[in-house]
Image (tube, rainbow, N blue to C red):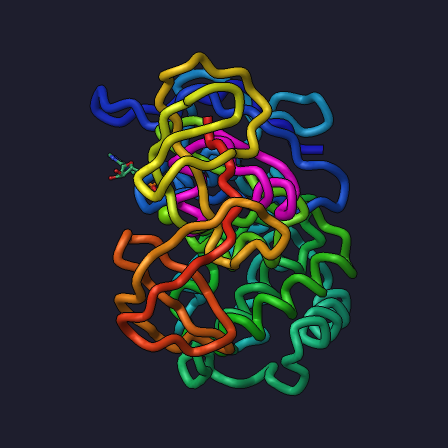
Amino acid sequence: MLEVRGIYKSYEAQSLLQGISFLVGTGETICLLGSSGSGKSTLLRMIAGLEPPIAGQILWDGIDLATTPPHLRDFGLVFQDYALFPHLDVFDNIAFGLKMKNWKSDEIKTRIDEVLELVNLRGFEHRKVTDLSGGEQQRVALARALAPHPRLLMFDEPLGALDRALREDLLNELRGILHRTKIPAIYVTHDQDEAFTIADRVLLLHDGQIVQQGTPAEVWSAPNSVWAAQFLGLGNIIEGKIINGKKVETKVGNSSMTCNHPHQVGKKVHLLARPLAAENEANQIRGRVLDVVFQQDRFKVTLDNGLYFYLKEEMKIGRMLDIKVKLECLQ
Ligand code: ADP
Ligand code: MG
């Protein structure tokens, strides 16, 4: 089991990570989700042993890996840019690491057959990697990472260079492969859809710290900060002032909110109004339709009070609308 314990990192006196700790359980896929520049790649490089942390430890089954060089950690890495050897064919790209580990040639052949089957590239052994599509190259990179039976797989925005449809397909396949092989994995991305699809557990990285973690459903249903709700694109965030108890005054009227913490009268809070109308709510928001955009199977309707909602029916611009909303307190 991998344990990351109290990792600190800075570059040129600029603090990047401040006390990152987490475990990756047996067969578990965790996803580190954070915006660009939040230190995700740096953290993976430290786990891989490619650079040292300033403080903290990386442990496997309780053993500190500080003195274990990258090639002896038995971790597989898959990058956004594939990092394949352009002068070698598919077979030799995958065989490279196995030869370094002194595998016999018949073992290498058997294993390459297995991993090519796993990533759906049977028959591709002698293709030049430079002739392959982006998706196929990423499958080769995945096969190469899987081949030596790593005890952990790490993915650094592996689908970032692919177009949307392909990304979805490959993501679902990868999810299947991780479940079948039961190899624990750390998947890093800035894309919340990707994270929520692949992860057993999501960790949100912000300002150098893990600010929230849980299953995708847990994080989705209870973001614990304004940043988390905004970053996950969960909907409208409005300010409110506590009138008393759960009653709150907002720019769209006085309402009651869902909240688990006590607040003093007059305290300012941030409230989340999810854009899917909440049918069973008593709270109602009134506004005039300002803009309507068709998105997937719904209409995104923006009101003149700045809030937006997804509705099944198309609305005429200028119409007054009453929408039921649940207001969730974010702090
Ligand atoms: P992410 O992968 O989340 O986008 P990175 O880990 O790549 O973030 O980088 C985080 C920050 O650390 C960036 O601001 C980057 O410029 C800085 N950084 C990364 N590597 C180095 C380095 N070797 N030297 C100096 N700064 C670095
Ligand atoms: Mg990165």
Q: Quadrant of residue 299?
A: bottom left
5 or 277: nearer the eye? 277
Residue range corresponding to the magenta coloring: 210-233
- Is 242 part of what is drawn in magenta? no
List x then y, in percent, for residue 99: 62, 59
List x then y, in percent, for residue 169: 58, 75
- Compared across the picture, whether 160 is left or right of 222 comes to left
- Compared across the picture, whether 324 is left or right of 119 comes to left
Say which residue appears at 63% left-offset and 37% top-offset. 214
List x then y, in percent, for residue 311: 48, 69
Q: Quadrant of residue 106?
A: bottom right
Say which residue appears at 72% left-offset and 37% top-offset. 25
Q: In the figure, 113 relative to 270: above or below?
A: below
Residue 169 seen from this side: yes
- Compared across the picture, whether 146 is left or right of 287 comes to right
Say which residue appears at 70% left-offset and 66% top-offset. 108
241 or 170: nearer the eye? 241
Of all residues, the one furthest to the left in this rendering is: 12
Residue 65 seen from this side: no
222 or 32: nearer the eye? 222
Q: Quadrant of residue 51?
A: top left
List x then y, in percent, for residue 207: 35, 29
Say which residue appears at 55% left-offset and 71% top-offset. 140
Count of numbered circles on the image? 0
Q: In the figure, 109 relative to 74: above or below?
A: below
- Is 226 part of what is drawn in magenta? yes
- Compared across the picture, whether 292 is left or right of 162 comes to left
